[in-house]
Image (spheres, rainbow, N blue to C red):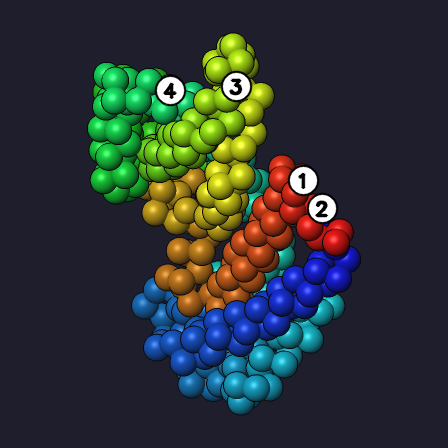
Amino acid sequence: MGRKELLHRLGQMLVTLIGVTILTFGLTYIAPGDAVDAILETGDTLVSAEVVEQTRHELGLDQPFHIQYLNWLTGLLHGDMGISYSAKMPVVDRMLLGAPGTLALTGVAIVMMLVVSVPAGIAAAVYRNSFIDYLSRVLSFLGVSMPSFWVGLLMLYIFGLKLGMFPISGGEVDLRHMVLPAATLSVVMISKFTRQVRTAVLEELGKDYVTGAQARGIPMNKILWHHVLPNACLPLVTLLGTYIGWLLGGVAVVEMVFAWPGLGFMAVRAIMTRDFPLLMGFVLWIAIAYMVINLIVDASYYILNPRLKKRGGE
């Protein structure tokens, strides 16, 4: 990727980020309910109208939309995303508490997916229309059809409650607590990625260079590992990047099922408590994560496919 193209992409990312923040800020502005009521809510205790108005003024919620947005954007440029209403701490600090859980869960889920789906997809392609291929397709169909929350509850019931192999609730970011939520997330990804690997490998196996290599007596294993798989990686990188971006956003449903202390769990709590500064920070994190991942994926094309690099140089 050349310097000019990189600058163009960075400019697009900046414009997209501004658009995302305006849209999200606008939605929180017109959202029903009052954030001040959620902040001052203390059981059955009544709060006077004077206290409500004073709190609204201190938070700047009594100002017009464009003033509130510009104040938030100015703070963002200085590294200040505001104070979380529910956590009573800076938004950046609150997100840093949830980031390790999401990052760890993302890493383990991606490893699980690759370890299972890549060999399964290759085997299904090499032994096309065999028992292995049919079994792979059936399991993939079942994996895609099952909702993540149902898979999570099923794993909790079998491996957590009945067998007692793993904890049934989160709270700690360690491998033992991570196995069940990561496995739940990987079920759908394994099902989709296995089919993509099978399709990509089959497409390469049907090309003339494979037939020519076999005619020259080159072993199939060598053709597969040195030629087919490197060429099949290109379309798979895009899907892998999508999964990483999806996981980095914090998968709220799975994190809620397992009470996992990640960004998705944090975002759901922010919605429930009308914690708009924290919600804005979460949306900004998702937007940045997706755009950075897409940029890395596009840059990897030039590494995996030298012809694109040569064409860009021309």
What residue lies at 49% left-to-right and 50% top-to-bottom?
Answer: 249
Which one is in front, 152 or 32? 152
Q: Which residue is mark 2?
A: 310
Relative image position of residue 243 (x, y in whole percent): 46, 43
Please tell me whether residue 113 is drawn above or below residue 220 in the rendered image.
below
> Which one is earlier in the sequence, the residue at label 3 or at label 1?
3
Tell me the quadrant of the picture where the C terminus can be found.
Answer: bottom right
Q: Which residue is mark 3?
A: 213
Q: Is residue 129 left or right of residue 54?
A: left
What residue lies at 46% left-to-right and 43% top-to-bottom?
Answer: 239
Please tell me whether residue 258 is drawn above or below residue 229 in the rendered image.
below
Please, what is the three-letter code of the amino acid marked with disc 4?
Answer: Val
Please, what is the three-letter code of the amino acid marked with disc 1?
Answer: Pro
Please, what is the three-letter code of the amino acid marked with disc 3?
Answer: Ala
Circle 4 residues within 10 Å: few <14, some 14–19, many ≥20 = some
What residue lies at 25% left-to-right and 17% top-to-bottom?
Answer: 130
Q: Which residue is mark 4?
A: 126
Circle 2 residues within 10 Å: few <14, some 14–19, many ≥20 = few
Please, what is the three-letter code of the amino acid marked with disc 2?
Answer: Lys
Q: Is residue 38 left or right of residue 11?
A: left
Q: Which residue is mark 1?
A: 306
Please tell me whether residue 240 is drawn above or below residue 206 in the rendered image.
below
Determine which quarter of the picture holds residue 36: bottom left
Relative image position of residue 82 (x, y in whole percent): 61, 67
> Which one is earlier in the sequence, the residue at label 3 or at label 2?
3
Q: Are marks 3 and 1 in contact (CB under 8 Å)?
A: no
Residue 112, can we see it? no
Circle 1 residues within 10 Å: few <14, some 14–19, many ≥20 = few
Relative image position of residue 41 (x, y in whole percent): 40, 68
Please tell me whether residue 124 is drawn above or below residue 267 in the rendered image.
above
Q: CA distance from mark 3 to mark 2?
A: 25 Å
